[in-house]
Amino acid sequence: VVVVQRRQRKGPVLTPSSLPCLEKMPTINVTEGCAHGCVYCYTQGYSGYPGVGRVTLLENIPELVEAELRRKRRKPGRVYFSPSSDAFQPVPEVLDVTFRTMGILLEHGVEVALLTKGYVPERFLRLFADARARVFAQVGITTLDEDIRKTMEPNAASATQRLETISGLVRSGAFVRARLDPLVPSLTDTAENLGPLLDELQRRGVRSIAASYLFLRPGFGQRLAHLPSLANATVWTWHRLADGVGGGKMIDADHRRERFARLASLAAEHGIDVHICACKNPDLPDATNCGIAGPSTEQAARPDAPLFGHLGQAK
Ligand code: SF4
């Protein structure tokens, strides 16, 4: 049960992001806090975080966005949902505000990029189908094992619901990429975990995935200490991530390189490309822009161009 409190957002909404992966794209959070309650989510340290089991709904976002778009001479090309919450939390009031806001953006010709660990309901799929090729989606999923999923992301959508969401988004004509993030070494990056997941993704038409490993902000190790495969996380070293993203404790670069190579070869057997998040892996030369907010506008305008190449644990 999530307690929803409401408040009116003040000030402009469509302002450029300072997050490097988003290249100044405006971002929207329809809530402060997030009902999904992922145990690794570092937005719980952000100001405005309402506490576990609570979200603050910024209920006037649709009206603010509509008014700003009417006033602006230059509209943003694309808007990203959401850097520090999830637009598809299982809370009807939140979904209503998300639906209205996305509808207004698409109606004004603004593209929508989204990253979610939630279930995207049918009415959104119809909205996206009407806005063909203007929606860029990443669906976070690292396992089909519900015990692991419930431990890591207790109130997020089940693996089955996320796979249904992927199928629905693909059918709607949205550009869809799965996001295997955060992978946990020796828990979710094993062939036993990844094989069946890649089988399902391939079957649902996913041709590219983004990936990155768990990193722990100070104070977060404690919360995850009960996961056996994180017993040696205490020896992980501090890594500086991209400017604006900060840093955290993570497995070292050599181990990441080796493990990403194994993922890439397994994915290749499924006809799936792997894109490594450069913001979180600035020490790996093969890391690229993982397309957290879709391909660049130029790529999107050229259907034959290789699409996508994000952020977040995802946020
Ligand atoms: S990681 Fe994302 S989905 Fe999970 S609680 Fe944080 S904001 Fe919500």
Image (tube, helix red, strand yellow):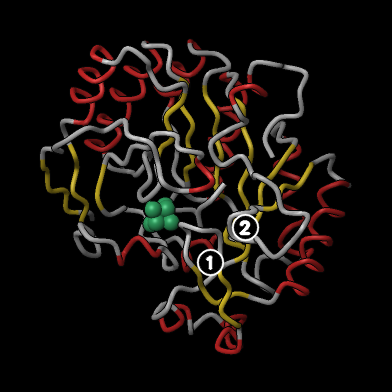
Ligand 1 neighbours mark 2 (CB distance < 8 Å): no
Residue type, label 1? Asp
**3D distance between C-alphas at marks 1 and 2:** 10 Å
In this picture, residue 293 sits left or right of residue 2: right
| Ligand 1 visible in quadrant | bottom left
Front position in the image: 92 or 189: 189
Say left or right for 6 vs 83.
Answer: left
Q: Residue at x 30, y 67 (%)?
A: 45
Q: Nearer the viewer, mark 1 or mark 2?
A: 2
Tell me whether the residue at label 1 lies in contact with that at label 2, contact meaning CB atoms closer than 8 angstroms: no
Q: In front here: 90 or 232?
A: 232
Q: Is residue 273 left or right of residue 33?
A: right
Disc 2 designates what residue?
143
Q: Position of residue 215 (x, y in %)?
A: 54, 70
Foreground of the two, 177 or 18: 18
Q: Position of residue 8 (x, y in %)?
A: 11, 38
Whole-percent x and y of residue 233?
58, 83
Q: Is residue 102 above or below residue 218?
A: above
Q: Is residue 144 left or right of residue 205?
A: left
Local SS, label 2? loop
Q: Which residue is mark 1?
A: 147
SS category of the residue bearing label 1: helix
Residue 174, picture quadrant: top right
Amino acid residing under circle 2: Thr
The mark total stands at 2
Neighbourhood count class around disc 2 (C-alpha, 10 Å): few under 14, some 14–19, many 20 upward:
many
